[in-house]
Amino acid sequence: MKANPWITGMLAVTACTGCMHQKASAPALKAKATGTAIVVVSGDKQLGGIGARLSQPLVLQVNDDQGNAVTGAKVDLTGPRGVVLDPAEVLTDDNGQATIKVTLSGIPGRYEVTASSQDAHGKPFTLSVAEFAAGYQQEVGYEVNEKYCSRCHNPDSTVEQVSNYDNLAVKPHAFTSGDIYNKLSESDLSNIIEHGGPAMNRSALMPPYEWTLNKAEIQAMIAYIRLVSDPPYMAPGVVYGKH
Ligand code: HEC
């Protein structure tokens, strides 16, 4: 017997309700509670390979107006094209937290992930965090930083590396300091990295790297600095779309 085309059509329509946003089987989550603010617990500003999942999940927390964590608040996540957020909607757990796996797009750059929720009156509140997708050049820069620079430029000590920052009489800036680094041109940056602080009338505590790093590694380091800078670096002469 031939299937009745009308019934087949109907079934297809029913099965596809909600296909636009998610699998038909997953009904939209309903908030059990509401908060007034979203804060980052961990996992923002990570650097990951292009197209790869970030090593740490993004952990967010919904708080009420007293600053207490709210369990059962609904958080919706959106990101630019190519960024996969898993899950894209979630209820906060017993600690008031939502844990999201983030996979970055295949194009190097800075990606903003926006989390939104609603208060008791249905008024939305949001939080945006940045994650960074590193292409080959930025990955090389990241390695250079880890090996040579971060012990002075990063004030925080890690298990692998004790920071030298506190011992320095003149303090360098973290490479994320966009307010400092965005004002330095490519040639300023390569000049100070190659020839050290005195080349730019700065402290000799910033050593020269011309005998340690080749041109490609210095370019890679600059690409890394441009990638992680906050506020973001806007290359001169490039027109950026407004959000
Ligand atoms: C031994 C510590 C030390 C190391 C290692 C080091 N720096 Fe620095 N760096 C400094 C200090 C101190 C300054 C600040 C100099 C000043 O303002 O007079 C500085 C300044 C800079 C500046 C100018 C912007 C700023 O932060 O004030 C750049 C760019 C820079 N360093 C890049 C690098 C790079 C790239 C590396 C690794 C290849 C590196 N540094 C490694 C100590 C260090």
Image: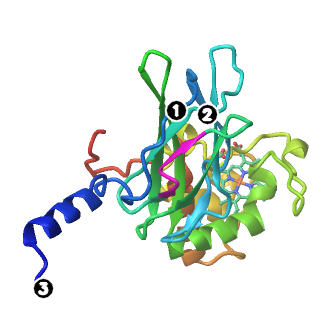
Question: Residue 239 at x, y = what percent?
Answer: 25, 48
Pointer 1: what residue?
31
> Which quadrant is the N terminus positioned in?
bottom left
Mark 3 or 1, which is nearer the eye? 3
> Which quadrant is the C terminus positioned in?
top left
Magenta stretch: give its range.
85-91
Checking the image for residue 236, the label placed there is: none
- At a point 52% along the width and 32% down the height, the residue shown is 31
Q: Are marks 2 and 3 in contact (CB under 8 Å)?
A: no
Question: Residue 241 at x, y = what percent?
Answer: 26, 45
- Residue 182, above or below 162: above
Question: Residue 63 at x, y = what percent?
Answer: 64, 25
Pointer 2: what residue?
72
Say few, some or many: other residues with alpha carbon within 10 Å of mark 1 (under 14 / 14 to 19 / 20 or more): some
- Residue 96, above or below 138: above
Question: Residue 72 at x, y = what percent?
Answer: 61, 34
